[in-house]
Amino acid sequence: MKILVAVDGSELALDAARHALELRRHGLQASFLLATVQEPTYVYEMVLAPDAEVLERLGGTVGSRALAGAQALFDAAGLPCEREIGSGLPAPTLIEMAERHGCAALILGARGLGGLRGALLGSVSQAVLAAARLPVTIVKHAETAG
C-alpha cells in the first residue's frame, strides 16, 4: 500500500508527515509519496518577468524547499519515501498524483500556507476531501497549551 502525504513547507503541513510516521510506528505496512504542488510558471512570466521567484519555480526550488521538512522527518525515522513536485491547482494535482502513483489514500494537514486565502477561496484539504475517490485523512494541528 502506498500513501500520498501532501505538504507545502509549513509547520502545520508537517502534521501530515508526523501522522504518517506514527501510523507506520504502529504497524501500518505502507510506503509513502511526499508530494507538493507549486504554482505553475506561465510562458508570459518567463518572457516578461524572469525574476528570481519565477526562476525558482522553473527549477523546482520552491517545491524542493516545501518537501524538505517532511523529508527530514522521514530521514530521521529511517524510512525511505518517494517525492514528487507537481504544478497547477493544489487539490486536483494532488489527487491526480495519488491516482497516477497507485496510492491507496491521501494524508494532508487541515491547514497549511493558505491562511486567509484558504478561508476566502476554500481550503485545499476541503477540496481534496470533496473530489478524491480514495480515502482522505485530514490531520488537525494539535494546539499546545500556552
Image (spheres, rainbow, N blue to C red):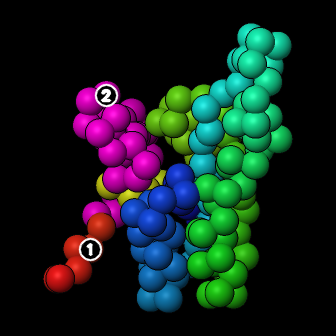
Vertical side of 128 occupied by 143: above or below: below
Pick the residue in front: 28 or 123. 123
Residue 43 in view of the camera:
no
Residue depicted at 82% across the width and 41% down the height: 59
Helix, strand or loop at label 1? It is loop
Left or right: where does residue 106 sit relative to residue 40?
A: left
Residue 101: % across, % down = 68, 48
The stretch in magenta equals 111-140
How far, Cα to Cα, is label 2 from label 1? 24 Å
Q: Which residue is mark 1?
A: 142
Left or right: where does residue 73 sit relative to residue 107?
A: right
Residue 140: % across, % down = 28, 64
Q: What's under tag 1, amino acid-wise? A: Ala
Residue depicted at 32% across the width and 55% down the height: 110
Residue 10: % across, % down = 48, 59
* Disc on the earlier residue, 2 or 1: 2
Residue 7: % across, % down = 53, 56
Q: Which mark is residue 121?
A: 2
Badge 1: few (under 14), some or many (20 or more) residues near its Cα, within 10 Å? Answer: few
Helix, strand or loop at label 2? It is helix
